[in-house]
Amino acid sequence: MKSTPIIGEWVIRLKPYVAQVIKYGFNELRLNRIGAVVFTENKASAQLLAKMGFEQEGILRDYMVQNDTPHDTYIYSLLNHA
């Protein structure tokens, strides 16, 4: 089984390509799981991930730092059940 790649905050900017990346990861790289991490205040990315079938697993406290400010993040995953 391969390791879990993480999709970050860029998920909204690359929205047209995310489905292709997921398909490639599951079909070509034979990944079992793809993870995503987004700032808790980034509702658009969280909603997009949910629409794509990702499930929220929890909150990582002070996990990411932006402009010297720590931020909580949601962690999501999508499993390949094929």
Image (cartoon, rainbow, N blue to C red):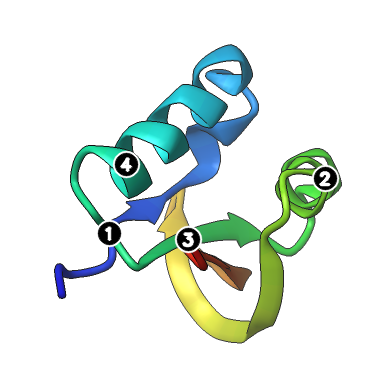
- The secondary structure type at the circle numbered 2 is helix
> Residue 51, labelled with which disc?
2
Q: Is residue 32 above or below residue 41?
A: below
Residue 3 placement, left or right of 70: left
Disc 1: which residue: 31
Query: 18 and 37: which one is in front?
Result: 18
Q: Are marks 2 and 3 in contact (CB under 8 Å)?
A: no
Amino acid type at image mark 1? Leu
Disc 4: which residue: 27
Say whether disc 2 or disc 1 marks the residue closer to the N-terminus: 1
Say whether disc 2 or disc 4 marks the residue closer to the N-terminus: 4
Closer to the camera: disc 2 or disc 3? Answer: 3
Picture residue at 79% right of the left edge, 56% below the top:
41
Q: Is residue 32 above or below residue 42?
A: below
Closer to the camera: disc 3 or disc 1? Answer: 3
> Residue 82, labelled with which disc?
3
Amino acid type at image mark 4? Asn
